[in-house]
Amino acid sequence: MKNTIHEEAKLSQTAVQKIPGGLCAIEDVWVSGVHAGFKKDAKDLALIFFPKGATMTAVFTQNAVQSHHIIYDKKLLNENSQFKAIMINSGNANTFNGPRGDYDVHLMASVLADQLDIAPEEVLICSTGVIGVPMNLDAFDVKVNKLTHQMTDGDSIPAAEAIMTTDTTIKQVAYEFEIDGQTVHLAAIAKGAGMIHPNLGTLLSYIVTDFDLGQATFQQMLQSAVANTFNQISVDGDTSPNDTIILASTNKVQITPSKANIAVFYQQLEAICLEMAQLIVKDGEGASKFVEVQVKGAGSKEDAVKIAKQVATSSLVKTALFGQDANWGRAISAVGQAQPSVFQTDKVSIAFQSDKGSIVTCEKGAGRVFDENQALAILSEKEIVIAIDMGVGEFDASVWTADMTEDYIKINADYRS
Amino acid sequence: MKNTIHEEAKLSQTAVQKIPGGLCAIEDVWVSGVHAGFKKDAKDLALIFFPKGATMTAVFTQNAVQSHHIIYDKKLLNENSQFKAIMINSGNANTFNGPRGDYDVHLMASVLADQLDIAPEEVLICSTGVIGVPMNLDAFDVKVNKLTHQMTDGDSIPAAEAIMTTDTTIKQVAYEFEIDGQTVHLAAIAKGAGMIHPNLGTLLSYIVTDFDLGQATFQQMLQSAVANTFNQISVDGDTSPNDTIILASTNKVQITPSKANIAVFYQQLEAICLEMAQLIVKDGEGASKFVEVQVKGAGSKEDAVKIAKQVATSSLVKTALFGQDANWGRAISAVGQAQPSVFQTDKVSIAFQSDKGSIVTCEKGAGRVFDENQALAILSEKEIVIAIDMGVGEFDASVWTADMTEDYIKINADYRS
């Protein structure tokens, strides 16, 4: 399916328009965000409410440690496809809290369901924040009461704000585009993968549409889109036990699905996921540069991804980028460490690129004398590409990452105090 | 064989004596170290000479990028077991230098062989330093002449010094012990795995003995010992294309090999490898702490190693240790990221330990309230243990690493300039 989608998508061109409102650009989506005491004073409890219901599907972290909310949500999503609310708290990850952690997720869902007059099974819960500290749910009904009373269908900013941890910017976008003459909407909010103050930079994203495609198709699409976008970013190589991406559809736009219109939608879904993923990297704590590791000509897709990820997570590569040092030796060593299945030293070339130009530092297995001043000019830019040509095949992959800075150490050496 | 060796070793107790002289504690081992212009002014060319020959075996980097010297040495070691000299330069890795890189290794071996009046095939070559810069071998015969004329059999310090890059201390030890009433010697020199100024902290170690066991047995032993020691250290998760460990025996001590005496020797070999490996971590650039990640009760040996390595290479865990922060949430997340084949949340416990005591921060899947002052006291020490009990099996592993400091970033952001 993946390939078909991509091929069809290339054929189709559709006019896409950016629109305001975030998730609320879609009809029958209400949101809210309040301070509930998980954080010191910022908003820390968000609600996305679908009064007419929504078809939902999700992708969760691959970390073997799974937050209590993930165990809870997975069970519900296996049993049902229709839900009415997602409630998210920041400031406490509700992870590794033993039986109490499970109890607290149930409690949160019940309190919300009660106040919205829906069934607890219609509520999904997410948490992000510190690991291993029990949730403070004192007077939680009062807090949820405030949450439900401040709902708006005007703009999802309050929710986008309440899910933030050390993010410095709100991350939300909304688009509309035509499918078979009808207007389809697609919107998303997200919070950061960090660099990584809160605790491992949980990645949360909520994507909403009104196109009716059914849970099974959405699930396939979301998995594919996440694999090509959110899973291709790396801030510091650590994953969180809480990472959650939920796709919800109000199903208002009813069009007979065809290969072509599914492809158009998928293209937009992947685009919005990529936009969110890149916003997350750009807002990485302590990051001073946005870096694309671009691998071309690998012997297999697996090789291309493996190589790009190894280079993007190498502390040595990332510190060199912070130092604006065209240290391609560290990049080539990371390539080797990835142990690609097809590798020929005398085929590999590496270039550094930015808006200031491109410089080839090694070509077909040997270093090239290059102008260090030109290299410095290129690497002084905020956005850098490390272009690696393996020269042995047809397969490409890109991974987006940030540099590793002294601020990264400062922030992360001391986050709990 | 591995298990047998270990079991036998446990049964045997032998008096081991530390002795001076490094590699030169063994008869018929001559060394030299001089400045040859690869580095600005420090010693950068080392020689270990065995006038009566030695049986040699080696373990090389698993990085797919392999230094030109490794390709050269591998070929010779496949063809022969007897060699007379190892020449090592620091300051230039002779890696990724195309056909010229191969030519230069041959040239280096020829020049040395000529001056020592031995065959070029009796010489192994090693290089460490910057990647992708062709070697400067101008007037190399003059430099090698100096090298061969300064040979000594008194102490291997000049060689141990000449292989250093940013190591701050010379790393050499020598021991003697009895096997079946005869005195056997075992000595080693090493240079650092970095943190990692030169370029990826190449690990080099040369281990010499006089016990005659033959290349095949030595090869098996060295592989096993390296797997349990050098391969269980991690400074920043990057490996170098140049890592080389050579074991050489002058074969002077002839004892009929038995399970028991092989086991005694293996025990000492593993011990000297562990000592060298730990010295390397302790001397890691920018490191302020020496950390043992100790995994117990894992479901398999593979799981235990995987978990320990994931925790030991997590930037978040390493920055928290620098910050003396008992942030066990980062450790448990790294455990989960390792995706062990057997994992039960409610069995996992984590403690931090040092000479100041031990504190359990999470027990059987849930965080424990702990005294932050006591935790800080424990983590203020130079040597820290993170003890992770998986609670699901019988398998253990330890990995040794260093914390990640602001100095690490400073050093590595700017090493080439």
Image (tube, coloured by chain):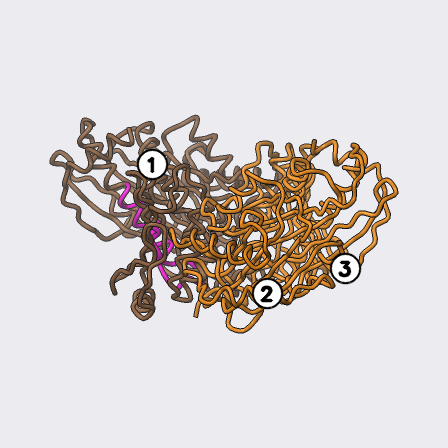
Chain colours: A brown, B orange
Dot label at residue A222: 1
Q: Nearer the viewer, residue A140 or A165?
A: A165
Amino acid type at circle 3 is: Lys
**On the rendered image, what quadrant is the C terminus of chain A found in?**
bottom right
Point 54% across, 67% down: residue: B407
Amino acid type at circle 1 is: Leu
Considering every residue shown, the one lying at the far right of the view is: B181
B20 left or right, relative to A80: right
Residue bearing mark 3: B356
Is residue A282 in the magenta section? yes
Q: Where is residue B389 drawn, in percent x and y?
A: 68, 41
**Secondary element at image label 1:** helix
Is label 3 in contact with label 1 (beta carbons under 8 Å)? no
The part of the image, by quadrant, that contains residue B167 is bottom right
Considering every residue shown, the one lying at the far left of the view is: A181
Look at the image and tell me whether residue B319 can be seen: no
Q: Nearer the viewer, residue A152 or A250?
A: A250
Q: Where is residue A298 drawn, in percent x and y?
A: 33, 41
Amino acid type at circle 2 is: Leu
Residue bearing mark 2: B147
Relative height, residue A181 to residue B334 (above, below): above
Labels 1, 2: front one: 2
